[in-house]
Amino acid sequence: MLAFHEKMPNVLDEIQRKRGMFKQMPIGPLGSFVKIKKEQWSGICENLFGRSLNGFLVSSYQDLERLREILSAKNWYPPKSSEWTNDSDVPVFVSKRDLFDYSSGEPDKQYDTVLRILEVCPLSYSLPNGEISNEDVKRQLIIQNHIESTILIESRQDADQAMYGGGPARVTACYALNPEGRKGPGSACGYKIGGAYVPFTNLSNVQVVVEAEFLLSGHGVDQLG
């Protein structure tokens, strides 16, 4: 847990100590559930997920307020902070626990997707006020980042060809690797083919567990039209 923000262990201890105050236990940090299986895509995933992996998932606004109180008490946020967005150090997502079927939104199996190169670590345990499941984490990342329909093609030329004319069915975005690799801060680890530009997010306050294999080295993603 030392790979997370230095305040994270104390926050998790406090959540456990006050677990009876939640209708359903918060799930998080989300990064503790996630492992990347193909390391060459780590830089792309850094930019795609941003601070999401440092965040929590709650199932109601009531539990959001209770988690807010804990974070504020640990001096992570001022008590009257009104906005909890993806740009926060600790984004808090409010979503009902719904194990929806996402298979209809996946592209052909010939393509790697972000979802297909991620291992959402097996974890499921029950508490008096709810079950925490890795499947909840997976679906939140699908909702937040469209990981089931974002394809990954190593060659920029092949990616351009695949996306020509609108791209394959059920694909919302495509990323390719930078063939020159990473050459230091500010260099691109890869490219987004078409779609809206995804700016690099400064991850200096976000630490992801070692098991997640996200190498926080400060490289951006360039966009190609």
Image (spheres, rainbow, N blue to C red):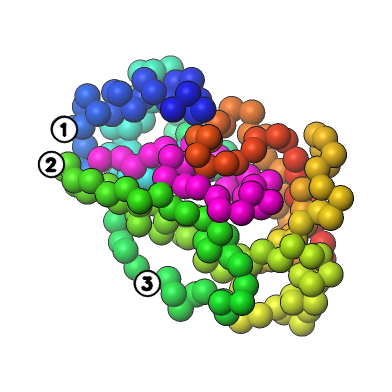
**On the rendered structure, is 17 left or right of 197?**
left
Q: Position of residue 122 (x, y in %)?
A: 35, 51
Figure check: 39 above or below 12: below
Q: Residues within 10 Å of mark 1 (few under 14, many from 20)?
A: few
Which image quadrant for residue 191?
A: bottom right
Q: Residue at x 66, y 80 (%)?
A: 168
Residue at x 25%, y 40% (from the top left corner): 25
Residue type beneath disc 2: Pro
Quadrant position of the N terminus in the picture: top left
**SS for callout 3:** loop
Q: Nearer the viewer, residue 89 or 47?
A: 47
The residue to which callout 1 is attached is 20
The label nearer to you, 2 versus 1, is 2
Q: Position of residue 119 (x, y in %)?
A: 47, 54
Stretch in magenta: 25-54
Look at mark 3 in the image and give the residue it sits on: 101
Q: Earlier in the sequence, mark 2 or mark 1?
A: 1
Q: Earlier in the sequence, mark 3 or mark 2?
A: 3
- Label 2 – label 1 distance at C-alpha: 8 Å
Q: Is residue 32 magenta?
A: yes
Local secondary structure at mark 1:
helix
The amino acid sitting under disc 1 is Gly
Name the residue tied to disc 2: 128
Is 35 included in the stretch rendered in magenta? yes
